[in-house]
Image (cartoon, rainbow, N blue to C red):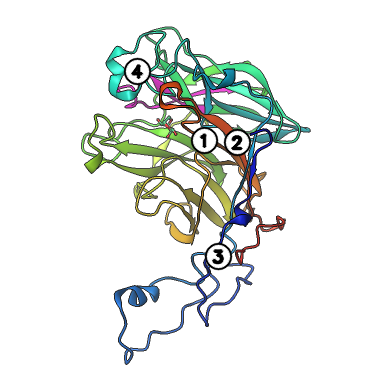
Amino acid sequence: MNAMSLSIRSLIVLTLTLPAVGRCQGQDSVFPHKMPEQRPDIPLSSAMHRMFDYPAPRVQDNELFSQFKYTRLQGFDYHNGDGTISRRDPSRPIRVGDTYHIWYTRRQSPVPPIGWNRADEATDAIPSTDWDLSDIWHATSKDGITWQEQGIAVARPPKPAPGWRSVCTPDILVWKGKYYLYYQAFNEPSGLRGDLCPVSVSYADSPDGPWTHGGDAIIPFGKPGQWDQNATHDPHPIVYQGKIYLYYKAAYNKWPDKRDVYAVAHGLATADDPLGPFHKHPLNPVLNSGHETTYFPFRGGVAALAIKDGNERDTMQYSPDGVNFEIASCLSLTPTAAAPFAPDMFTDTKDGRGFTWGLCHFVNAGTPQKSYSILARFDCDFSLDVDQPGFKKTGV
Ligand code: AAL
């Protein structure tokens, strides 16, 4: 799969054409068109009835629709896929000078993970899941495709400090010239109660470190019975309205295996200081779907990509205020753990311009017995400034 490149253009896209729905042309609105009025004298099926509830254009043909092209990254060694090394959950890339920087979960263990359902057999050397026994690593690139691994940014602290078992799923904030990494801190193997973990933070004067521990449990769990009582995961900060807007995920009823009542949602916590305190928004949760968190400033509001989990998975959503999200488009083959390179994600812009690429991960790259994940690049067209060839918003 050297320089593997899967082109979504080769897929046939079925285009639903509604006569009164035009192309997106407005400069100020994500939803510039209205559906035609429903005619009460014409009987409708359920499907056609609810069509009139949707703002138009939806599904595709608007500026928050795109397809995705995936490219394997160069420069990362995976030990010939024996499952003993894994990279996943990349941060969003940032550009400093002429260099891109990323941070990510990196597991290197003598054996591949044995599986969450055997977590009670995990030891200090045997990982349960792919993100157990991990550290946060740093890599750099000049072109976003070929990467040089630079080494550990944030290591597991000694037991019993929070995160001694695993630190993973980082994301980055640049705020007033300093760099902040937010990440999950595990005190037990994933699959036991390890996943019921909160967020820690470390900071540095340079993307090259050194990183100083800045706090634990900075997004506290909700009270018993609340949606985020057990976990605050996937921390994902942007700068919006002069504040740090940190989105996070809580998965409830994930462990033990009660998948019939499993659900995910995303919350928002805001702060004036990267080390906190963070204040949870009273309307939390603000997104009802998405296994990981992907948010970016778009026009005057905030857009969010919901992937993998939930009734609204595989949608791009838009909110005029960072809180009240509506589906803007339905997407196919979305990037998992998407981490876009949006140059204005920390500039407190009032006119977010979107992005054309980012990083993501593919899980289960190996066999079930030798499981590991790889990082990949995706290209797309959620940019208001750059037309990506081959990603026309009208589809194929
Ligand atoms: C990821 C993230 C979180 C979960 C696990 C590791 O994709 O959602 O980090 O805990 O899976």
Residue at the extreme right: 98
Does residue 172 appear anywhere in the picture? no
Question: Do the CB atoms of the residues marked 4 and 1 lie less than 8 Å apart?
Answer: no
Mark 2 → mark 3, Cα distance in angstroms: 29 Å
| Camera-side residue of 232 and 47 | 47
Residue occupying the point 67% across, 44% down:
343
Q: Residues within 10 Å of mark 3 (few under 14, many from 20)?
A: many
- Name the residue beneath numbered marker 4: 189
- Pointer 1: what residue? 362
Q: Residue furthest bottom?
A: 41
Q: Which segment did they paint magenta?
A: 182-203
Type of residue at label 3?
A: Val
What residue is pinned by disc 3?
Answer: 30
Q: Which mark is residue 376?
A: 2
Please tell me how crowded label 1 is: few (under 14), some (14-19), or many (20+) other residues with Cα within 10 Å: some
Q: Which secondary structure lies at badge 3?
A: loop
Amino acid type, mark 2: Ala
Q: Is residue 128 magenta?
A: no
Where ligand 1 lies, by image quadrant? top left
For residue 165, above or below residue 59: above
For the residue pair 215 and 187, the one nearer the viewer reads as 187
Confirm if mark 1 falls within 8 A of ligand 1: no
Which of the marked residues, 4 or 3, is nearer the chain's N terminus? 3
Front disc: 1 or 3: 1
Q: CA distance from mark 2 to mark 1?
A: 7 Å
Label 2 – label 4 distance at C-alpha? 26 Å
x, y percentage for residue 179?
61, 28
Q: CA distance from mark 4 to mark 1?
A: 22 Å
Residue mark closest to the camera, 4 vs 3: 4
Residue mark closest to the camera, 2 vs 4: 2
